[in-house]
Amino acid sequence: MEIAKPKSLDGTSLLPQVSDAAAAGRNAVSYNSKASTIRTTTHRLIFHKGGTVELYDHTTPEGETKNLAASGPELVSELKAQLAKRLGK
């Protein structure tokens, strides 16, 4: 069953991901006045307003307990660019 999107709304439906957790989707992005974050299937990057960066690898046992930003500058740059693009910066 297809649900029609109201013409007054702009965006992409999340129904495919809600219906099937394995469905392809976009990376999750979040922001507030103090930090922005992007979450991929394997990593999470947190970029703080003051310039501090956190990078975590969710495929390792350490998860979000070991900040890998200093040892992964290429990935930090890539994810930071994706985050900026998604936030329109």
Image (spheres, helix red, strand yellow):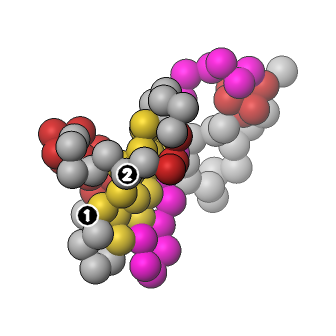
Badge 1 crowding class, 10 Å Cα cut-off, few under 14, some 14 to 19, many 20 or more, is few
User: SS for tag 1?
Assistant: loop
Provide the major secondary structure of the magenta segment.
loop
Which quadrant does the C terminus fall into? Answer: bottom left
**According to the image, label 2 marks what residue?**
67
**According to the image, label 1 marks what residue?**
89
The range drawn in magenta is: 20-35
Residue 2 falls inside the magenta stretch:
no
In terms of sequence position, does the residue under pointer 2 or pointer 1 come before the other?
Answer: 2
- Residue type at mark 1: give it: Lys
- Where does residue 64 sit, x and y in percent of width and height? 51, 48
For this rendering, which residue is in front, 78 or 66?
66
Taking 51 as reference, is 40 left or right? right
For this rendering, which residue is in front, 49 or 31?
49
Residue 29 falls inside the magenta stretch:
yes
- Where does residue 29 sit, x and y in percent of width and height? 48, 52
Q: Is residue 34 above or below residue 69?
A: below
- Where does residue 53 sit, x and y in percent of width and height? 30, 61
User: SS for tag 2?
Assistant: loop
- Where does residue 7 sit, x and y in percent of width and height? 63, 51
